[in-house]
Image: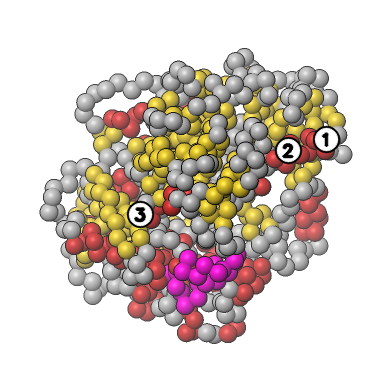
Amino acid sequence: MSAFAILLAFPAVAHARCDDIIPAPTPETGAKRPITAVDLIGLRDIGDPDSASYAGPSPFAVSPDGSRVAYIINRADLATNGYCRALVVNELRAPGPPAVLDRGGELIKILDVQRGFYLPSGATQTIVPKWSPDGRALAYLRRDNGVTQVWVANADGSGTRAVSRSSIDVDVLAWSQDGARLLFASRRDGAAADAAIDREGEAGWLYDRRVSPEISARPLTPATDELDVVAVEVQSGRTMAADSVDRAALRAAVAPDLPADPVAVAADGRRAWAERAVSSPLAPARLMASGHNGETMQCPAAACAGGALSIWWDGDAVLFLRREGWDKGDTALYRWSVDARAPVTVLRTDDVLHGCVKATTALVCTRENSVTPRRVVTIDVTTGAVREIFDPNPEFAGIRLGQVVRLRWRNDLGLEAWGDLVLPPDYRAGTKLPMVVVQYHSDGFLRGGTGDDYPIYLLAERGFAVLSTERPTFFAAAFPKLKTWYDINAANQKNWGERRSLLSSVLTGVSLAVDRGFADPARVGITGLSDGASTAAFALINARTFAAAAMSTCCMEPNTTATYGGIAWADWLRGMGYPPATANNRAFWRETSLAQNAARIDTPLLLQLADNEFRLALEAFSALREQRKPVEMYVYPDEYHVKWQPVHRRAVYERNLDWFSFWLQHEEDSDPAKAAQYARWRALRSPARSTPQPRPTR
């Protein structure tokens, strides 16, 4: 029996919640107020909140006639520890607040596929609504009571209804070509696979490649590309078997099947694409196109080699959006007539353009920069003129942010890198400040670095300089013959080449801020999540630059890595050159193991970790604690690699602020609720450490 039951006959109207999901007009008061954690956590998001993520789908769906754009707005709600979500539609010819078609639903999170199994990541999934061919309705995914279902909204705002009731999440949906049917699907036999794991548990789960102990003793569910497909007749609600045409339409809607390099198909069938001369994923992909007679045309200009994000046809011309400039810090829109040698630059900016889709004579994108949160804009594809359609966060016009200075440098390998140095709003020239390094991307509006745990503007408000770094290109880019990402990762890992390159970049950026008189070299802190945490740990072992540190994930250690990571991860690491747990290869781990270097690490370290990852930190934490080093660890329940719960994000923000204020500014918050925290931290001070006594603040 199918897992789906169709409910078209009973329209389940979404309950109106989160009335401020569309902002009210903000009066201009002149004076700006300080930024707060609530401001950052409550940002209204359109698409992936991570400004550095260019690989995901666009959040925008353009109507068939090109006059409207639909998308989902998402905002964290601290009061409920949940999220406000709304399906909205903007008229492209009349900029202004969008019309709300539906409110409600829970956050839909990404399930990563790693080593053949589904792994929860905590990151937000971009839900793209689907217009019906006649433009009268929109289908979209909405999650309620822990299950993702298909909903349909009338485009004129006259109502919404649930279309599916599945026992497991619906993963993908599409309209049939004629618009008469809705097609949706879940992973093949997903309910049966989950039930089989439950039954296996009655006699004990076999500990095999399915188990990742740092997450759970329960085996992970095997990933599959096969789908159980349902077709529903929209008018009658009758279900039917999906034919080959319907299945093809659904497969085309599956975002993970998008090619690694962009492709565009014109109305007459001609193609434009990016093609690599060699098979390495790191080789630049050059722009190609089909001529009128079917011949292949190659754009020979330098601007056509590498960095392409998206490609579109516009009449006989090819439009393409490209990252370029110093360490890919700029975005440019080009127009190439296929019979011309060089493209014409339509627009170039150091702002970040995300999720661009074509609507007749314009692109619809989000646009943001270091001091401006994401907005919806259109870009004229001929003139490059930018017009704002909707600002989802107008409150930020009345919020005081720190001063931002863009710094550029090369690391010791000559690789380009850059960072945004954020200074307090009232910074006085010549003042040397305590500084915190936030990693490892600095694209777009500055929140809290990758993973959003280290609030840049809140740190600046507290009197810190903050260096938000953009990582250089991979160390392995020097080896163009590497053909797979596995080979690239192995080359990056060999002799810790990538880790050395990243540390060199961070240290060069710190030195630049110090040399220019912004930062006090004796009061520099470092932070990081994921790859950034690995760089932070490497820095604590191989440099003496940092006086305090905070990490959101931890750690790669000789015993823990091959144990709590599970069999599949241990095998994968050994294939990349890591030794087995029984090898006792101290030389291999000398430069990366916090545990093996615990006796000589004095930097105070704060760990704020997800409950499904903290076991990987136990070896390092225990070794540092045994050596009486200043270390403290917190574990957050029901969290993943990226923390998703608003109340946890606020707690992480606040504790990171307190930690760096304590160690780098010698200040304590006078809030009585934090008395025990500061008593512990004072006890962590080494008797040999000559620092001023903390003074109460705030």
Answer yes or no: do the residues labelled 1 and 2 have beta carbons within 8 Å? yes
Residue topped by disc 2: 250
User: Which residue is found at the position 70% from the left and 33% from the top?
Assistant: 174
Helix, strand, or loop for circle 2? helix
Name the quadrant of the C terminus: top left
- Choose the circle earlier in sequence order: 2 or 3: 2
Q: CA distance from mark 1 to mark 3?
A: 50 Å
Helix, strand, or loop for circle 1? loop
Q: CA distance from mark 1 to mark 2?
A: 10 Å
**86 left or right of 23 in image:** right
Dot 1 crowding, Cα within 10 Å, few <14, some 14–19, many 20+: many
Residue type of the residue flagged with mark 2: Leu
User: Which residue is found at the position 66% from the left and 33% from the top?
Assistant: 268
Q: Which mark is residue 242?
A: 1
User: Which residue is found at the position 63% from the left and 46% from the top?
Assistant: 295
Viewer-proximal residue among 504 and 452: 504
Q: Is residue 184 above or below residue 160?
A: below
Q: Which mark is residue 500?
A: none
Residue type of the residue flagged with mark 3: Trp
Residue topped by disc 3: 326
Dot 2 crowding, Cα within 10 Å, few <14, some 14–19, many 20+: many
- Residue 117 position, x and y percent, is 68, 57
Q: How many marks?
A: 3
The magenta segment is 477-499
Residue type of the residue flagged with mark 1: Ala
User: Which residue is found at the position 44% from the left and 80% from the top?
Assistant: 590
Viewer-proximal residue among 561 and 57: 57
**173 left or right of 285 in image:** right
- Residue 310 position, x and y percent, is 53, 43
Viewer-nearest of discs 1 and 3:
3
Q: Is residue 517 above or below residue 351?
A: below
